[in-house]
Image (tube, rainbow, N blue to C red):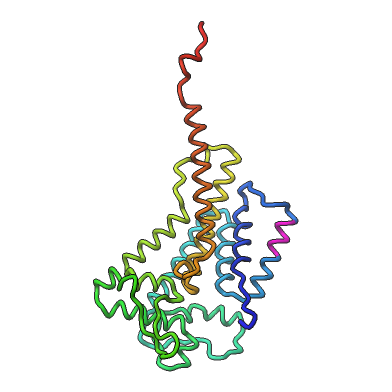
Amino acid sequence: YSYALNSNLAVLGILLLLATWRTGVRLGTIRLRYLILFGMLFFVAASLSRVNVMVLAIGGAMIYFRSRWVSYAAMALVLALLIIPFLSLANQAGGGISDVSTSFVQKLAGSLSEIAIQDQYDDAGINLNWRGYEAFLGVNAVNQNGWPSILAGLGLGSYVEGPFIDKLNIIPIFHNGYVTVYVKGGILGLSIFVYFLYRQAFPATRISLNAVSAKNRARLLYFQKLSGLLVVSLAVRTLSTHGIIFPSPPLELLILGVLHGARYKIVTSERAVVKKHDAPPSPLCNKPE
């Protein structure tokens, strides 16, 4: 934290390379790819970012193993990370990191405890488990207003009051972005947001990969894998570091937009070729027998 190290761009670079695995798409030479990969991994290790380590672990498992069940298991893990904090809502103080000299491995193991949505009763507990306590304030504010608020939220301009007077006394957005959506839009808003992530991870190409040329097939497969990796990154980041719900949205959204445009261009061009080949010949072109 003293040097403000940020490895988000490094993770993005690694995901761009991971998506090329078994697709036929090549980004530069092999030596250049390995150089970029190990360089980006160094930046991630130097930043000690637990979120980025989780993103790379899930993304690497999805890409390395060919079995679909591994990808489904990775997606299930992401969903579990989203659901567990809500299931852990309690009025009792939760445990946390009690020593500033705690190692990185211990902090990684205690991450779920930190994001668990639990109340705290003293300043030390609030300080050490701020993400979970902050999320508790938001979820509790919605639940106290009954089923209409649980279903539709408190509105886009809603906020909760924090425990401090001079700082963080008003909290309009939360480190847990899903809590932000829940406060603003309730269960309905959460459902729409999760569906949005799902559609980004599994975009509708409306054309079979077997019906396109080999070059475009490799590109579409690369776009498909990269979209899944970017959505995993967004889902994990939204859980603990605001993610999409932040004044400065992550670059994953920009890349997803570029992928949508590139995918649409390929599908449109392939449809034109297929339509041209399937069209009946013009009578003017028929040669007399």
Camera-side residue of 149 and 116: 149
Which residue is at 58% across, 82% downward? 106
Q: Is residue 37 magenta?
A: yes
Above or below, 41 against 90 in this view is: above
The stretch in magenta equals 32-38
How far from the left and from the top, in percent, is residue 173?
42, 75
Above or below, 245 against 98 in this view is: above
Q: Quadrant of residue 58?
A: bottom right
Above or below, 128 against 232 in this view is: below
* Dominant SS in magenta: helix
Q: Residue lying farthest right? A: 31
How far from the left and from the top, in percent, is residue 69?
50, 57
Which residue is at 47% across, 40% downward? 207
Which residue is at 39% across, 63% downward? 193
Q: Is residue 4 magenta?
A: no
Q: Quadrant of residue 189?
A: bottom left
Q: In the image, 154: left or right of 133? A: left
Camera-side residue of 121 and 244: 244
Specify the quadrant that holds the N terminus: bottom right
Which residue is at 42% across, 90% downward? 164
How far from the left and from the top, in percent, is residue 266?
53, 42
